[in-house]
Image (spheres, rainbow, N blue to C red):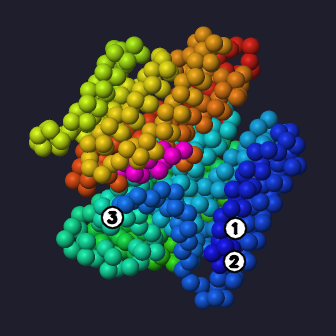
């Protein structure tokens, strides 16, 4: 069984790699690669599920890929297979298979035909890793792949303004979810002193003794997981990102935001259900969050003029009901609900263009007066107030910007006096002093030593704030991001047991990606005189190779699972003590804002309408 399970996971990877070498203009070969790779896996999942049921449907767990090991830490890839995996994998394979058939004709003669199918296969690879994951580390690999695929698919029409702008918005919400998963992994390291698997979460005795003495740890982990699930499944207050994600092609909207990706928050709560089911306060919070989201999303959906926005908020409302079902303990009902909602929303989004055309004609020949609704029984002032709030989508988008991103930008703009030369004049000597202090740390008073890690972490946080708000010089923003990683590495080095080899694993990927990305910016400056970040420049149109290399460098610098830095980030959190909340918060915020700054930099320089007037200017929206 284990061998067959490994083959099922490898099929999407082989399909994605094969698509990269397909001829760019041969639509038949490109579509058939996607069609057959997803189709083969769908048949394989059906066969494996039948074989699994005949053998008594045991819960399978594969732990045979160890990427890093030390005396007190092991980073391993773990896969599992149970009823949750069966439902999510079957639904995912069937819908992806149908959408690839649909997309073959829908995307016909599209200039970026190959890029669309390669991104879809990459998304399906991330989805497969996520639903087959047996521990948090493996889940996070799939989670990161889904995040970057989301950005690429929303910004698929990369020469238009709104698709690129909304792609950055959606990616920013995904990064908020990432911080919840990172903090949950951090605290679970200290609760069990090992990388826990999801099967071990089913063992009540494993965490019952720990909760008797430190119950707040369980609540903290559960709330971090709920933050991740709410961001991924567009629950309050993050609901506004889902309609913005509809700027991509209709097939990607159907499979990504109507059916599969948006339900992964529900999947995370299902997968960790044995952990938080005994925590009554957590279940109440999950239920109340789902209830409030369902009510508000339903009100918004009923007054929207765009059919895609209506479908998006209707899906959000149903996912809120799934949260309620999980909080009430009806896990099987939530699985069934997910299946029905996924198929329905995929169908609705795929036929939405035809439905709009039909309804436009229908309203002229068969006019029907508006039906009476429950809101008509309210006093008119209340009815109109609810209507205006719903039309404005309860200002959820403005709420996120005003209370989260704007304070960070304002704080970063206070550092506008910094320049590239000043960075080298001040930061490098300060870092050298930090290394000297680290070397002689045994001679430092304990009262002073306890504050050193947080102090150097704050310096790194100041650097990343400046990078996030930088608008003029992309070189300085890039150097600041690289230096932030060095400051974080230095800060964690003051904690015991953080070895030189572990530090090197984390920094090695940063150095290589930092050098490559910096030279990409320098090379681009030879061709383009104006290279600020006040607007979208669209340089991917004339410099696609530089854009691709810079994107890969940005992903590597952000800790995407293509370099050793991904493992290094998990190593860093395993060495942050459970009492160092300030350091854990600063480190996680640095990682999150780093990723946002990098994606924003890539989008501003290479995506959007081209700045040169001799290129055609497309519509602002798709």
Residue that mark 1 sits on: 7
N-terminal of the pair, mark 3 or mark 1, is 1
- Quarter containing the C terminus: top right
Q: Dot 2: few (<14), some (14–19), or many (≥20) neighbours within 10 Å?
A: some
Please say whether residue 509 is one of the residues in the magenta stretch.
no
Q: Give, as a single range, the part of the protein colored magenta.
A: 563-573
Nearer mark to the viewer, of 2 and 3: 3
Count of residue discs: 3
Disc 3 on helix, strand or loop?
loop
| Image side of residue 18 versus residue 271, left or right | right
- Quarter containing the N terminus: bottom right
Please say whether residue 565 is one of the residues in the magenta stretch.
yes
Residue 406 visible in the current orientation: no
Residue at 41% x, 58% y: name it. 70
* Residue 19, above or below 339: above
Residue that mark 2 sits on: 48
| Image side of residue 470 versus residue 576, left or right | right
Residue that mark 3 sits on: 193
Figure quadrant of residue 542? top right
Residue 123 visible in the current orientation: yes
Residue 252 image offset from top left, x and y in percent: 68, 49
| Image side of residue 51 versus residue 172, left or right | right
């Amino acid at each position: 069984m284990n061998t067959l399970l490994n083959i099922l996971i490898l099929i999407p990877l082989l399909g994605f790699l094969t698509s990269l070498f397909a001829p760019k203009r041969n639509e038949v070969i490109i579509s058939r690669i996607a069609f057959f790779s997803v189709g083969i896996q769908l048949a394989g999942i059906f066969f494996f599920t039948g074989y699994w049921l005949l053998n008594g449907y045991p819960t399978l767990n594969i732990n045979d890929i160890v990427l890093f090991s030390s005396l007190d830490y092991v980073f391993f890839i773990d896969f599992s297979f149970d009823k949750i995996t069966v439902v999510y994998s079957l639904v995912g394979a069937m819908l992806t298979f149908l959408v690839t058939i649909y997309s073959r004709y829908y995307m016909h003669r599209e200039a970026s035909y190959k890029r669309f199918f390669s991104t879809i296969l990459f998304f399906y690879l991330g989805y497969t890793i996520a639903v087959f994951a047996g521990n948090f580390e493996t889940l996070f690999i799939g989670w990161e792949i889904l995040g970057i695929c989301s950005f690429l698919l929303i910004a698929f029409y990369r020469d238009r303004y709104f698709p690129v702008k909304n792609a950055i918005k959606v990616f920013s919400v995904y990064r908020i979810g990432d911080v919840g998963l990172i903090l949950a992994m951090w605290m679970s390291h200290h609760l069990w002193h090992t990388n826990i698997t999801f099967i071990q979460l089913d063992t009540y005795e494993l965490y019952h003794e720990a909760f008797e003495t430190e119950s707040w740890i369980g609540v903290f982990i559960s709330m971090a997981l709920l933050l991740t699930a709410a961001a991924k499944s567009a629950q309050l207050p993050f609901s506004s990102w889902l309609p913005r994600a509809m700027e991509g092609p209709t097939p990607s909207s159907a499979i990504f935001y109507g059916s599969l990706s948006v339900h992964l928050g529900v999947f995370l709560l299902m997968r960790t259900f044995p952990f938080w089911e005994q925590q009554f306060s957590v279940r109440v919070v999950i239920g109340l969050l789902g209830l409030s989201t369902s009510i508000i999303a339903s009100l918004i959906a009923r007054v929207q003029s765009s059919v895609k926005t209506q479908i998006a908020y209707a899906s959000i409302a149903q996912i809120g009901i799934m949260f309620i079902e999980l909080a009430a303990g009806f896990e099987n009902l939530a699985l069934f609900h997910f299946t029905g909602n996924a198929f329905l929303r995929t169908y609705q989004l795929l036929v939405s263009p035809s439905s709009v055309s039909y309804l436009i004609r229908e309203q002229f020949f068969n006019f029907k007066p508006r039906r009476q609704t429950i809101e008509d029984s309210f006093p008119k002032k209340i009815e109109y107030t609810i209507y205006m709030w719903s039309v404005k989508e309860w200002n959820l988008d403005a709420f996120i910007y005003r209370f989260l991103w704007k304070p960070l930008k304002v704080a970063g703009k206070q550092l506008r006096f910094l320049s590239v030369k000043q960075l080298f004049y001040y930061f490098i000597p300060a870092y050298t002093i930090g290394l000297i202090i680290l070397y002689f740390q045994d001679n430092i008073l304990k009262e002073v030593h306890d504050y050193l890690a947080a102090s150097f972490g704050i310096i790194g946080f100041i650097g990343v704030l400046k990078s996030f708000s930088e608008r003029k010089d992309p070189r300085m923003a890039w150097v600041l991001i690289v230096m932030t990683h060095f400051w974080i590495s230095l800060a964690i080095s003051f904690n015991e047991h953080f070895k030189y080899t572990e530090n090197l694993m984390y920094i090695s990927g940063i150095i290589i990606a930092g050098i490559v990305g910096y030279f990409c910016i320098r090379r681009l400056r030879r061709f383009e005189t104006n290279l600020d970040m006040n607007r979208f420049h669209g340089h991917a149109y004339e410099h696609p190779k530089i854009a691709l290399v810079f994107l890969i460098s940005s992903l590597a610098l952000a800790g995407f699972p293509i370099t050793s830095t991904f493992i290094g980030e998990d190593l860093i959190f395993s060495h942050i003590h459970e009492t160092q909340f300030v350091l854990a918060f600063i480190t996680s915020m640095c990682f999150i804002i780093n990723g946002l700054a990098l994606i924003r930099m890539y989008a501003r320089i290479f995506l959007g309408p081209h700045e040169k007037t001799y290129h055609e200017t497309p519509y602002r929206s798709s």
